[in-house]
Image (spheres, helix red, strand yellow):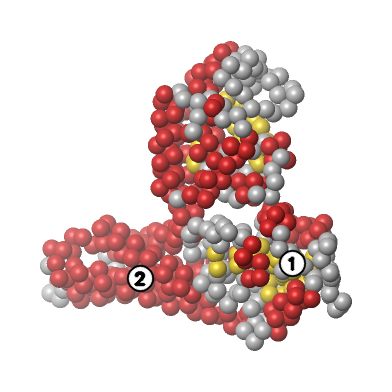
Amino acid sequence: MRGKLVSIKRQRLKYIFADWASTMFGWLIFNIIRYSIIGIGIDQVPLIDYLCSTTLVIEQIFIPLITLGVFWLSGFYNHPFDKSRLDELSVTAFSSVFNTVWIYLALLINDQIYGRAKGYELVIVLFLCLFTFTYICRLLITNHAVKHFSDSRWGFNTIMVGDTDSAMEIADRLRNSQTKLGYNVIAHLPIPGEKSSTRTHATIDAANLEKMCRSGQIDQIILAMETQDQDKLLGLIYKLVPYNVPVRLAPTLLSLLSSKIRLNDVYAEPFVDITSPAISEFTKNFKRTMDVVLSFLALIILSPVMGVFALAVKSSSKGPILYKQERIGYHQKPFKILKFRSMRTDAEASGPQLSSDDDPRITPIGHTMRKYRIDELPQFWNVLKGDMSLVGTRPPTNNEFERYNSYYRRRLSITPGLTGMWQVNGRSDIKDFDEVVKLDLQYIDQWSLWLDCKLLLQTFGVVLFGRGSK
């Protein structure tokens, strides 16, 4: 079983505390050097009085807290056991540069009165203090973890998908490797149609695998089948993704997948993580931060408009103001999407279906709301909660999800959005379900922060001119 000390939350807290302490110490050392560089106190204020001044005490308290926000945004805490040595160095360096810049602009720029040369010295010293102590502390924590894995005191409960002779060989290499990679293979999942090894080994069925993943007893899954069928491999992957457990791919299967993947080697892992999107942790955190900030502001600024249309919906037809429908979100997790009700209460008596501009089920006020996307304003609450993003794929209904093949399930590999390619390309012009999905897959393949900004700007045009309908 897994070592008792292995805990992602505990490891994350170690890094957070170390970053806070190292930044606090670094800022103190910087101010001592700063005192000497700019000459404060030689004939005026003693060093101890300078360090204990109200301004510096406040800075000593709040600067480490603000830098923690920068470290979080960098994505360093997202996967404390899942990063490369190079990532650890580069993320720490870039975060220290960013912290140096904002601290200088916010607090130190007035020190330029003592001379430009001293200003440059302050910037260099500040960066060295922030980076050096932070990186040393992080390196000590990482090396401590690596040592525990090497000594077999820590490990991750692992299920090997496949129980052929080749899968058994991979499991043996993990158990007997001199580097002790931290994998504790506890069972194999046999694959129908593949010849099981004659060696004695523990097995698990799909039902128990899901149960153990849901209960947190499994830390990761390794795919080591012998199949050369891409559809079969993708189908299995998308069945495992909802378990919310990292799924790793043996190098022998890598050539079957053409999508971008991420290789992590801080603990010398020889496998490819296929459950993490091919975007940086900073990008993911930045996107989520913008979702929270912008959706919160939208709910406040648009509250008068939402109030007016809530009254209009209530007075124009019988039924609730808000319409709730179950949609399938990120990693196939269901959620309730919110909209202003724009149809009669019996509109889906025969089941959910796509609508058109002249749909008789739409109420009079509903036509106006749908034309200008006003019915979707309550979805800012879904964005704030994290069910949705401002930009993403269209969240499918249960009926649509049941029609997905393995390839189409890629649509659920990112958080669905309030707007996206499908929305800005004129929804009333799209009748083909396959075309809708292809636009979403195109968004996934081309995704970037710039693309999100572009789609948001295009959405304003769609709303302003009332182009397309839902």
Q: Outermost residue toward the bottom?
A: 178
**What residue is drawn where x is 19% and y is 74%?**
37
Circle 2 residue: 130
**Residue 3 makes an appearance in the image:** no
Q: Are marks 2 and 1 in contact (CB under 8 Å)?
A: no
Q: Which residue is mark 1?
A: 225
Label 2 SS: helix
* Residue located 49% across and 33% down the image: 425
Task: Measure the alpha-carbon separation of dots 2 and 1.
Answer: 47 Å
Residue at x 48% of width, y 49% of height: 446
Of the 4 image quadrants, the one containing the N terminus is bottom right
Secondary structure beneath dot 1 equals loop
Looking at the rendered structure, the kind of residue marked 2 is: Leu
- In the image, residue 306 lies at what x, y percent? 50, 25
- Residue 214 percent coordinates (x, y): 74, 57
**Up-down: is 51 above or below 420?**
below
Residue 58 vertical position relative to residue 92 in the rendered view, above or below:
above
Task: Judge left or right: residue 125 versus residue 184.
Answer: left
- Judged left or right of residue 137, residue 273 is right
